[in-house]
Amino acid sequence: MLPSSREIAFHSAISCASVANGSTLQIIDNQCRMHKIDLGELKITRSTPLSSGMSPTLFDYYKRPASIGQNLAYSASSNQGLEHVFDIKSQLLSVTSFKYNQNEVVSKAALSENDRYLITGNERGRSYIICPEDGTIQAELPVTSDAISAVAISEEYQRAAYASFSRELIVYKINSFSIAFEQKLNAVIEMMTFLDEYTLLAITRNGKILKIDLYKGKVIQEKLLDQNVWPSVMVLSHSKKFVYIGTRESILFAVYVKTLDTLYQVKLPYHGVTTLSRTQKYFIMGFKTGEILFYNHREFEEQFINYIKLKQVKEACLIFQKNIFLMSHRETKKIYEYWLEQKETIMNLLSRGDIEQAQKIAEPFLFHPKCKLEFAEIEELQPDLMALQRYIRSMSYAPAYDLVRLKPELKKSSLFKQIEALWSKNLQTAQILLAREPLLNKEAAKESLHAFLDVEEKKPLIENMLKRSGTFTLAETAVKEKHFSFYFRLVAQNNFLESTPLYQKVLQVGERLQQETLKYLEEKNYQQSLILADILYQFRPYQNQATKLKEASKALLILEYQIEHKMLLEAVKTQDQYQLQSHYALVGELEEMKQIFHDHQITLVEAKEYDKVFKNIEPYMKISICKQHIANIMKKIYISQFHDAQKMMDSAIDWEKSFLTYLQFFPMDKRLSEFAKENHKLDVLQRIIISTAPKEDPIYPKQVLTYLKSPAKKMG
């Protein structure tokens, strides 16, 4: 079942691994040595010790005091209490060192996807989020009562998480410095990863996969992988459709993320899976015994794709016996699509009692968990399908609908679709008759619906339609005379009008009106767009869109005047009030004016005209759409003030309080850390622990600097 592979053996367990630029495998082994492997030639290009103070220890799945990312690596020395971050892109260079876990053993560590964040967890239940480039603490997470068993962090979703042996799970919002989720589960989490900002996927020590909704604050899905395995590593596929799980027993599982069903499982040749990585060519696995296997997960791919194209499902599935990894190939989904094509045939065969032929058609598809489940469900419905078939043949539609009400799964069957198609056809015939001669054709209309008169859910509509047969004439007259408000009032009072061809035609008119209105807005013809939006408002289903288009037309008329007269502040307020988006050409002109204003302020900052800049931007500070521009300018002012103070060698500055003032308004950023590094103040910055997010509606002071005592000279 496994394809061909190559391997490289090391003398120590593989602790962590990452793939850089799709061309290099980077690993750290249990002896804290970093190795780089060229994935083109599958040869080791570098082996370097990360720490000279490390003494060899036996590999422990729970103690992984190292992490390796794209360009950075982290390692913690339990002997010296030091933690190091290295730049590994070209040469091994120490970036920074710190001692946040001094006298504690780091049990877990992880770098985020682009090395922006590092999360560590130790055996005393403490966890820190750190900026790896300068070693500053971004957050100290709440202390738990036992050792940290798992950590996860994501730049994309601005989330971090840790789990502990006390079964606690905490998820933290990095950008708002707040707890997103806190709960005690009924098992110890081994590994976890974020699917999105609201969903966490985790696997427990006892082999359960959990999908946790962070917004709802609960486990929304769980499934037992296997009670006889001990999970040791988990990684998401690039598409996030599958999750791959390795175990201490050397079994690899592939699981559907959506359903948590197992797609396949396979036994691996070496002991204890510790790392999993995937590239375009290889599925790479590291082991406790020191081996790294490079499986050619695309082997037989071309032959497999050809079989799929030819719809030779059985032959395609036989290839899985040579390469099980192709089961998660993108083309495999077509097998499910072919299954859907055959599903109707299978259901029809079962409805006629031809079970053997139905099983024969289904057999090639049953490797697929979803197909297998659906076939089992269809088999259970077989007696009901036969009953539905009998009702259709005898035109007994009332009991047919009763059966479908009891077994909603039958709604998906082609048999039920046949009944619904017949109902639609007969209903349309009745409506045409009533539209021509409401009184004379009432009996003929009733006769055309005779087969459905006893169907419980159809009765109210039929009775109402026959009782108000004159409504059809009223509706047609209203449309001819373009009284659309009256027409939609009729539709609201008589829902049977929604199933008429006339209703669809009127909706098409509304759609065309909406498109015309949008076209005039794009052409800057705001008066005409306002007229059309007023007409569109008569079309009830389009009233929300019409209201928005009217508001936009009015707002753009105002904005046009303000831009012509260079009234920037008033124009920005109009944009903010009406939430005008940049796809309007006029808003594009305003954005250019705003950028010119912004660039001018930056020039003034560079000329040290801080008071003048502050006076210019103060009227814009409370306008929400200006927040980012204002923040950029104030950040520039404050960093410039830091440089001015350093240049003047002002010893009266309290740098810790000054940095704290800056961090009240902005998150820890590269500009601040670079200033601290260049001017030997990184130790001051590393002492600061931020516990609250920057203010959402800040009132910026003119001056960021805080003095130890009243200075003789203040800076402007």
Image: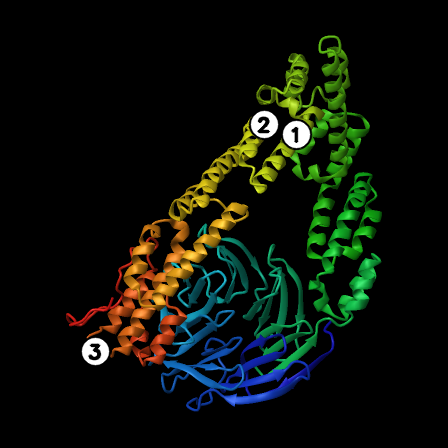
Which amino acid, mark 1?
A: Val
Looking at the image, which residue is at 63% across and 78% down?
23
Q: Which residue is mark 2?
A: 539
Q: Picture coordinates of residue 679 (x, y %)? A: 32, 80
Looking at the image, which residue is at 57% across and 74% down?
248
Q: Is residue 514 above or below residue 447?
A: below
Name the N-terminal-most of marks 3 and 1: 1
Looking at the rendered image, the quarter that the N terminus falls into is bottom right
Please indicate whether residue 672 sits to the left or right of residue 403 in the image.
left
Q: Which residue is mark 1?
A: 509
Whether label 1 touches label 2, CB < 8 Å: yes
> Front-most of 489 and 328?
489
Looking at the image, which residue is at 62% across and 76% down?
285
> Front-most of 433 and 169?
433
Q: CA distance from mark 2 to mark 3?
A: 72 Å
Which amino acid, mark 2?
A: Phe
Q: CA distance from mark 1 to mark 2?
A: 9 Å
> Front-most of 441 and 230?
441
Q: Which residue is mark 3?
A: 651
Whether label 2 touches label 3, CB < 8 Å: no
